Image (tube, grey):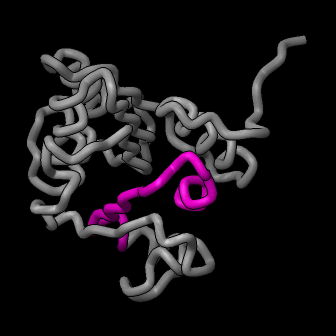
């Protein structure tokens, strides 16, 4: 996702907010050590400079304000705890607060897309989805099934997520039928 956003000429700036839990998962699953230079580790280079990183505890960051101009938000991967926090308007960290602002301040102009880390068939996810849909002024949040592990399927999932927020990718797979 970060590579696709960095390479997309339509994207002027992206804000990257890794949660504390994601940092641990990144370290274990991607064999990344340390928290400094995280974007360089993901992108493999210094990137274009248009991706800015904030910590989840930085509740005073620009994206926490309703006056900050945003065109969409993606929470990927999205744990069921984060989904529940967003669905209930908890705003206990920057991820939840930015999602709350996205849904509350600009429900039609700022799409929110959450790609689950776990199966959305769980009871927790079902309750969170029900709350998300029932939230007043919550716009049209999209919650997509978890990304599979195979590289080609992951790229297809990223392409689908980006299409949901208005950034269809050239060369993305599209089913043409028989």
Task: Name the residue rendered at 36%, 83% in the picture.
Answer: 35
Whether residue 132 is situated above or below residue 134 in the rendered picture: below
- Is residue 30 something that shows in the picture? no
Quadrant of res 16: bottom left
Whether residue 57 is situated above or below residue 4 in the rendered picture: below
Judged left or right of residue 9, residue 166 is: left
Task: Name the residue rendered at 25%, 18% in the picture.
Answer: 133
Residue 74 horizontal/vertical position (percent): 40, 44
Residue 38 horizontal/vertical position (percent): 44, 78
Residue 137 horizontal/vertical position (percent): 16, 19
Judged left or right of residue 163, residue 133 is: left
Quadrant of res 85: top left
Look at the image and give the residue range highlighted in magenta.
1-23
Residue 145 horizontal/vertical position (percent): 50, 33
Is residue 4 found inside the magenta-colored segment of the image? yes
The foreground one among 104 and 20 is 104
């Amino acid at each position: 996702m970060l590579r696709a956003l960095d390479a997309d000429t339509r994207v002027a700036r992206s804000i990257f907010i890794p949660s504390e839990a994601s940092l641990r998962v990144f370290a274990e699953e991607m064999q990344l050590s340390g928290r400094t230079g995280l974007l360089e580790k993901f992108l493999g280079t210094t990137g274009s400079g248009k991706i800015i990183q904030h910590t989840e505890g930085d509740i005073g960051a620009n994206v926490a304000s309703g006056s900050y101009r945003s065109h969409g938000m993606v929470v990927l991967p999205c744990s069921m705890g984060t989904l529940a926090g967003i669905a209930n308007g908890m705003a206990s960290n920057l991820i939840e607060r930015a999602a709350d602002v996205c849904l509350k301040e600009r429900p039609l102009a700022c799409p929110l897309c959450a790609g689950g880390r776990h199966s959305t068939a769980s009871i927790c996810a079902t309750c969170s989805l029900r709350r998300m849909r029932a939230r007043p002024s919550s716009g049209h949040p999209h919650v997509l099934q978890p990304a599979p592990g195979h590289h080609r399927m992951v790229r297809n999932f990223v392409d689908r997520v980006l299409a949901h927020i208005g950034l269809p990718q050239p060369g993305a797979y599209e089913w043409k039928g028989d």
